[in-house]
Image (cartoon, rainbow, N blue to C red):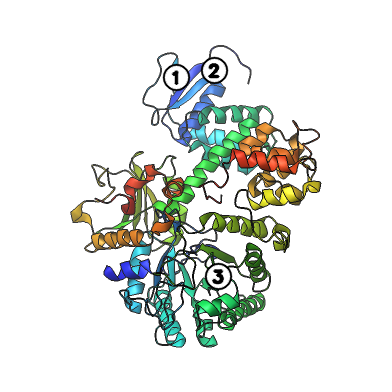
Amino acid sequence: MKVSGPYSIYTYDGSIDGFFSVVFHAFQSRIPPADILSLVSNNQIPIGDIIDVTTCPRQAARVRRGIASKSDKKNLRLVQVAHLAETRQTDMLLYRYLVRLFEKPGQSYYRNMLDPLVYDLVQAARRVKKEVHRFHGFVRFQQTRDNMYVAAIDPDNNIVRLLAPHFTSRFPHRKWLIYDVRRKYGIFHDTSGLMEVKLEGHAFELDSGYIGKNARAVREDLYRELWQTYYDSVNIKERKNSRQMRAFMPKRYWKYLPEKSKK
Amino acid sequence: MRKLDILADAAKYDVSCSSSGSNRPARDGVGNTRSCGICHSYTEDGRCISLLKILYTNNCIYDCAYCINRRSNDIPRSAFTPDELAGLTMNFYNRNYIEGLFLSSGVLRSPDYTMEQLNEVARKLRNEYRFNGYIHMKAIPGADPLLVHQAGLLADRLSVNIEIPSEQQLLRLAPEKNYRSVFTPMNLISRNIAESREERKRYRKAPRFTPAGQSTQLIVGATEETDYTILRLASGLYNRQKLKRVYYSGFVPVNSHDSRLPELKQPPLVRENRLYQADWLMRFYHFRHDEILDENNPQLEQGIDPKLAYALRNPHLYPVDLDRASYEEILRVPGIGVRSARIIVANRRFGRIGFDHLKKMGVALNRAKYFIVCRELTTGIKPVVYPEQIRRKLLKSTNGAGTQLSLF
């Protein structure tokens, strides 16, 4: 794309379709972005020349097809996973990457990790995947009175959708819900499949992630206390190494881990 | 709750934790296993919690000097029933607290009886609860081969702990045990694994025997064996018995003073860490145990890691040209890990590898720079000329033995 005319700041709703709509818009209008900001993860939007793009699934689909036809499938996967990192610069990196892809198609750029742009994108995708792996362990379900298992999470990256496959294969015959309290949506699973859900009101206490006392199964508190007891008794005091513990399990994750957030 | 406290507390000195190496779908039941393993939490001492690690009972007929559950200790004793333990495991698993069960036990009445109880817990989980998550069980030395075989069909991993790295010392500290009692079940398990593999080649539905293999544990620092002896033993276990993991556990004096054991103020954590590093060199970096240490250098250096020590003892092998050298050679450069080595080999056709790339990959340049040829170091620094200077420099920059014991 030739640089012609002014630059502008684009804003969108933070979704991957929204991001692809921005890309579509920028290419069509030939106004390259000076910055791309998600309205969800940025509270302060600078004053100036702003184009707010409405998410359009049809435009997003066209960009997707474009990427898929320009090179192999892994590119699309890389772009979509890196986008979930939601870091400040990732969207611009992705945009620059896509410009390159569309200008000189047919190359598997993502293979060249010596290229700083590619390396940073691969790193962003890696951060996302790392957090997904962490949350395979850190999700804590609570059993409800009507025998559903629910969990509140607050991850750095927008990973709740990526958690679904693991928990679907682990608990295939059960109703469960994993809810991202910051992004205010979650994944619900029952025997008929997966569904994205938004909850009204406060189903989870924000500081502990617990569901209301009346909603909990009879023995829920008992098992949580047993788990806390277990956690304390497997520690070997002579080997205390809290720094190492925090390296693996950073403090920001503690609030929804019952073993780390005792009342 | 008291029971859980006692029996988890008593099990914690077994350091094995992993939930890896197995891959089983949930099918019509609950749970699956993932070959990568998943850690669910981390204790204050920095170790991961993956499995509910617990003893069936801490009653024991043996009296081993190094063990907290020995017969002569005056401690609260307790035991689960198979129902209690299976129920607890399921409730923890359903809440995603754990990846599965690590079931060990003191020896109650007889090895056969104990093994039967452990098998009963696993059988309940597998058959009644249709649990397909991870189960790690101890094979009780001295138990009937048939019982061990049944255990292997139920569990993902079996382990027999050697504990003391030489038979002579074991006899001194645990007069009721010997190497034969440990190696008999271990060899039996490795034979069963090999047979099951063969059968599955011919008949795909043949039952799997411990799909995640077997492991063992060695206590370090309770007796006088050198690191060389320990690594030689571990290497043999990897090669002959085909073990998946050997764990090293720095000796923690758990019993009031016993004249047969050393008095330590602190468990030998640095030594333990160096042993793990050496173990990693054998398992992932294609080192042989006798390349890491030999009769003349029987101990790992505490101040520098074993790969750096190897490089300084073999300066003629360096510098390694990152643009040309084989993957194997690059793996032997101090400061370069498996992931970085792979990236280098896969990407060097796009251009010359430079410091900026290495830094981004996370290569420890402070060590690596003495041993490589790359864009900025076209002829490399010749470590042949001054290995001693490099050692001194690096020792200074890391303040000798640091406190950080991370492996990754």
- Report the front residue among B12 and B131: B12
Tag shown at residue A31: 2
Q: Earlier in the sequence, mark 2 or mark 1?
A: 2
What is the quadrant of the N terminus of chain B in the image? bottom left
Residue B139: x and y in percent read: 50, 78
Where is mark 3, residue-wise? B216
The answer, for residue A133, to whether it is visible in the render is: yes
Q: Residues within 10 Å of mark 2 (few under 14, many from 20)?
A: many
Q: In this rendering, is residue A81 above or below B266? A: above
- Horizontal relation, residue B81 to residue B311: left or right: left
- Mark 2: secondary structure: loop
- Report the front residue among B148 and A178: B148
Type of amino acid at the residue the image marks with label 3: Thr
Type of amino acid at the residue the image marks with label 2: Ile
Tag shown at residue A70: none
Q: Residues within 10 Å of mark 3 (few under 14, many from 20)?
A: many
| Distance from the alpha carbon under mark 2 to that under mark 1 | 10 Å
